[in-house]
Image: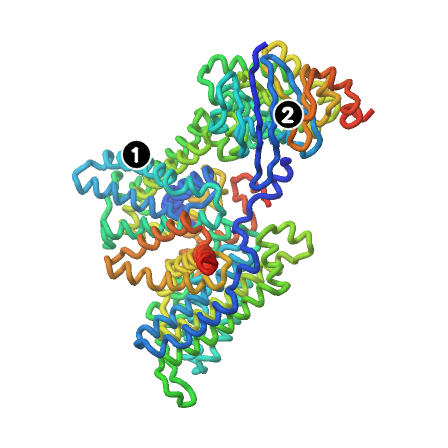
Amino acid sequence: MELFTNQVLAGIATGAIYACMALAVVMIYQAIDHLNFAQGEMAMFSTFMSWQMMQWGVPYWGAFILTLALSFAGGIIIERLLFKPLAKAPVLTNVAGFIALYAIVNSVAGLIWDFTIKQYPTPFGSSPFLGSQLISTHQAGMIGITLLMLILLFVFFRFTRVGLAMRAAASLPESARLVGINTSWMIALGWGMAAAIGSVAGMMIAPVVFLEPNMMLGVLIYGFAAAVLGGLTSPFGAVMGGFLVGIFENLVGTYIPGVGNELKLPIALALIITVLVVKPAGLFGRPIVKRV
Amino acid sequence: MTTMLNVKDLRAYYGQVQALHGLSFALNEGSLTTLLGANGAGKTTTLRAICNMVRSTGAIEFEGKPLSGKSTENVVRLGIAHVPQGRGTFTTMTVEENLQLGAITRTDKKNIVADIERMYEHFPVLKERHTQQAGTLSGGEQQMLAVARALMLRPRLMLLDEPSFGLAPLIVRELFKILGKINREDKVTILVVEQNAQLALELADQAYVIETGRIVMSGSAKDIANNEDVRKSYLGY
Amino acid sequence: MSAAEEVVTEAPAVEAVPKRAMTLGVGTSLVVLAALVIAPLFVKNFIIFQMTMLLIYGLAVLALNILTGGSGQFSLGQSAFYAVGAYTSAILMEHVGMNYALTLPIAGIICFGFGFLFGQPALRLSGVYLALATFALATAMPQLLKLGYFEHWTGGVQGLVVTKPDAPFGLPMGQDMWLYYFTLVITIGIYVASVNLLRSRSGRAFMAIRDNEIAASAMGVDVALYKTLAFGVSAGITGVAGGLGAIAVQFVAPDGYTITLAISLFLGMVVGGVGWLPGSIVGSAFIIFVPNIAESISKGLSGAVFGVLLFLVIFLVPHGARQVAIVAQQMLGKLKKH
């Protein structure tokens, strides 16, 4: 039994990583109805920017805030320049656009900062949290930051005018325009927010997986799995999905013999497909109404 | 009486297909006008063209200002509320959130709260359900909500696209009674597109008849209702 | 336009290509064929090898084109099918000692089965969800190949070395040239079969599903069957390409079949023009030569160059090489008149 609780705890700790990423995935999905395959790369790039600032002597939290702001602006600029013109294009074209962005960001990061692995600092330290060997203070801090972001998002969407307008624009663009909402800018705002959330995810994940241009690939797949499990329409579901995926991964690794670290990605794959087939709306999402 | 909306030589296109062939009409301030016509005559297109939701040419002036080249949301911000066909309800949001969305372009917070209360007076059923998801309302209730949401803009002009569509006759009567009241008391100019010609002509003071993208008849609602051809084609007696 | 109409006629995920526009005319086909037959006689072995790879990737892009351009389904996971084909050929040749030519149909059949099975759950997914599931498949594949269980067969992380075949019947040509002609024959065979497939009843069913799934099922098309069938056929052809690739490269290893390969194939399809089969070879040329050129300018640059070019294609010629070909044809037509 103790093994079980310990593994669950460890699962929650890793799950926080996926939860962060899933939150960013859901943000963009809400705004544009697409999964951004470049989300992980954008987060990686943001993390590199913060690392560079710290190399230049900016203190951690200063770099953190600056990166948040730059990522937000960057997300908006990318949308305005590259994806606004594709708004009416077929899904295929959009997917191609995401793939192109993925390749560009990954390659440019490699050109600027090369492909060697870099240490990334944590503001929370990495001693055992409350004396537990399973959760470090960094992981506890990461869980705290994820939950804080979730609460902020909830407040934003539920109680602010812009949040209400964004929700309206995402659910029914035409009706939203008819009440005077500039839906095109709401989408740009969604990109900005997703990029900012992604940058937080990247900065929280980097101390765990180390900083390098390919650091986010596995995390992104797990983030997708978490978002799909929680329901792509629900930020709350995304975070819960993240924790559940983390726990699931740990339990499978512990109790099913022969499943080691090398099966991490195949497990995520199996999970994604199972959820999509059995319950496509996810655990907490709105049912998907299929339009033909 | 001053002209509020002036439409001249309006032509609209869906891709290669031309749906309106040089439509001209005018709405007087404070009037309640109806646009009658059969399926596919171009009624909905006319309303969509006013809000720039379809590619069109020609001149549309609202209170002397041209609307061409303005985005839909900017047309709405001038004070033109559009209740679309199918109601456009934000089904996943609550009734109250739908009303708040109607006033999303306004910044006078206090008045918004007061206006929501006023809508609940006009439509008591919405008050009963104000925390309910809008998608759970019946068709008639959703139509009430759509009208209320449009009024939250404090519009100068309200465009309604077949408000009677899919509703029971009794509910249609109630809705039209409220529309008349809004027109008289709140001084909102109304343009309503209808297939239910009989009710629309009872309600309106001006009427236009549209066929295959052209205005074929215009006049006071009373004259139009008494016209032999209209009676045969649209009223059925 | 009524509300009901708008709901029913939402744009399909993939823009439709008229069926007649899917292939080349007879004259152009013969010219291209002649060029492909004669060219290797005049170039060095390394170029012949690259031309072989051009055909192999062309097959893989063609396979994706049948899936996406034909039936409207996405796949970012073609590298997985390619890998299965490559490993099937390699294992049969090296462990079983089978003749290389015989391994290809087996690779095709195994991949057809794999694709057909993967198509079962994928059936219920559309658009972006399908892209996601296949994306996950492609990322998971290298890890599956590294698994300890299969190490005896797959060689684990090290991979397998494959022997290059000699020309048979004592034909006077080098290994590279023989393999090129061998590949060319297979490519032409599959290309012709694909064209016929898309022109057949099944092809019409694919396209009906692509353009409007509900309408297709209302007309009596067995949507589930044809969607999985499209997946199977596409995977099968990709498998053959993978097998040929293993023989040509003489080596298989898990890290040769990452998501990057899947992305490349996807790129090749977009560049060549979705649904335009001859474009596959153009797309293939793009994904083989562009990275080489980019890497020669600066290491690690190829991703950026890929991405930028892809954006240019999307913005300027959204129908890829097909659009360029049509414009060229029109200009030729004008020249002839004057």
Left/right placement of residue A183 relative to residue A48 reads right
Viewer-closest of C9 and A31: C9
Looking at the picture, which amino acid does disc 2 mark? Gln
Disc 1 and disc 2 in contact, CB within 8 angstroms? no
Q: Residue furthest front?
A: C338
Quadrant placement of the N terminus of chain B: top right
Q: Residue furthest bottom?
A: C170
Left/right placement of residue B59 relative to residue C149 reads right
Occupied quadrant, residue C200: bottom right
Residue B136 at x, y = what percent? 63, 30
Left/right placement of residue C71 relative to residue A66 reads right
| Number of the label disc, if any, that sits on residue B143 | 2
Residue C300 at x, y = what percent? 27, 56
Closer to the eye: label 1 or 2? 2
Q: Residue furthest left?
A: A57
Dot 1 crowding, Cα within 10 Å, few <14, some 14–19, many 20+: some
Which residue bears the numbered disc 1?
A69
Residue C86 in view here? yes
Look at 67% across and 16% down and name the residue there: B206
Residue C184 position (above or below residue B13): below
Q: How many marks?
A: 2
Viewer-closest of A82 and A246: A82
Looking at the picture, which amino acid does disc 1 mark? Ala
Residue B122 at x, y = what percent? 63, 15
| Number of the label disc, if any, that sits on residue C321 | none
Q: CA distance from mark 1 to mark 2?
A: 43 Å
Name the element at disc 2: helix
Q: Chain of mark 2?
A: B
